[in-house]
Image (spheres, rainbow, N blue to C red):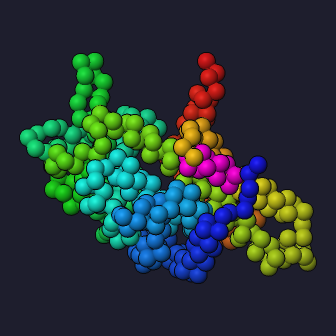
Amino acid sequence: MLDPTLPAEYEDLRKAVEAFAREEVAPVIGDYYERHAFPYPIVAAMGRMGLFGLPFPSEYGGMDGDYFALCIALEELARVDSSVAITLEAGVSLGSMPVYRFGTDEQKEYWLTDLCKGERLAAFGLTEPGGGSDAGAVNTRAGNVGDSWVINGSKSFITNSGTDITSLITVMAVTARDDDGRAELSCVLVPSGTPGLTVEPGYSKVGWCASDTHGLVFDNCRVPQENLLGERGRGYAQFLRTLDEGRIAIAALATGLAQGCVDECVRYVKERSAFGHKIGEYQAIQFKIADMEARAHSSRLAWRHAAGLLLAGKPFKKEAAIAKLAASEAAMASAREAAQIFGGYGFMNEFPVGRFYRDAKILEIGEGTSEVQRLLIARSLNLV
């Protein structure tokens, strides 16, 4: 049976991140969000806490933790703000983790120490302007020229790719094609500032307004041959592993947003009066919040189950898809109801639920849409 009680080391981490989110993030994040500004002081503080190094060994400056610990931190951060949470999620799951999983000893030693400290950030360049859910539709090319890879193409919606502390972008590219035109996909490490790499202006986004997101253009961008990440031609398999893990992390983040909706609504209904009563006394409001709490609880069980399978070395693809689907849709539904409970105030950015509502939708899109998750689940059932 599932035991909802966290072991002491995880519970201590949860409490520490919860306190940090309430005391350090909540009072200031609204200003960053309104200005569409990246919260460098908050990221630096998370680095000092060791959050960017949670799942990595101490030999690379990590905390000797695991992916479950990372997800615990993401849930607690997202209870207060998703921009901060996605900065951590993308920095670790999409940025550092591929280097750790597939890099050479030299690559790990060179890149991971600063990444684990949060002093630098890494990004994963996968999505392209015409790709969308067809993540394998890669047109960016990396040609083998002498002792270098020469990269040409573009990427879209890349998180953490344009900050002042971004140091590395892992780029998925076509490195060859067979006689039938099938692409050989490989991953190549591109340091920030490499000539031929242009970081486009940041997007004007509906949500996640305090996170960093850019398009990238590669124009004869040249990096050494030794910047190949992992085995040549294994880029697609590497990306699938990265996304499977990332879906658990996004599910944890979505659970945090859903729980944050409950937190804010419980506080608000005890303060707000209408028709001579606190609105928390009305059954219609009580039922909305009860449904929100049920969604958050179910989502938490789903991501913890998937994370448990991952840590046990067991197959977890289906469970990760279930967790991501359930939690992202729970977050969207709860954010909508929270805004309704707050009424006009729920439509104002100065209130957290306004940000929650704007932030929730992308959870049904990023790291695999809800439709992709349903496709993965259906395939696992061998329906045809």
In the image, 280: left or right of 90?
right
Question: Which image quadrant is residue 340 in?
Answer: bottom right
Give residue 51's position: percent from left, percent from top.
48, 68
Residue at (84% x, 63% y) in the render: 285
In the image, 105: left or right of 52?
left
Q: Is residue 170 magenta?
A: no
On screen, 2 above or below 240?
Answer: below
Foreground of the two, 121 or 81: 121
Residue at (59% x, 75% y) in the render: 16
In the image, 31: left or right of 279?
left
Question: Range of the magenta residues?
Answer: 300-311
Work out which residue is located at the far left of the displayed protein and give it: 146
Question: Which image quadrant is residue 122 in?
Answer: bottom left
Give residue 193's position: percent from left, percent from top.
21, 61
Foreground of the two, 287 or 113: 113
Is residue 318 shown to the viewer in this render? yes
Give residue 56's position: percent from left, percent from top.
43, 60
Question: Which image quadrant is residue 384 in?
Answer: top right
Is residue 11 shown to the viewer in this render? no
Residue at (56% x, 38% y) in the render: 315
Give residue 174's position: percent from left, percent from top.
27, 35
Foreground of the two, 94 or 114: 114
Q: Main secondary structure of the magenta part?
A: helix
In the image, 112: left or right of 86?
left
Q: Is residue 304 magenta?
A: yes
Q: How many numbered discs?
A: 0
On screen, 20 above or below 77?
Answer: below
Residue at (33% x, 61% y) in the render: 112
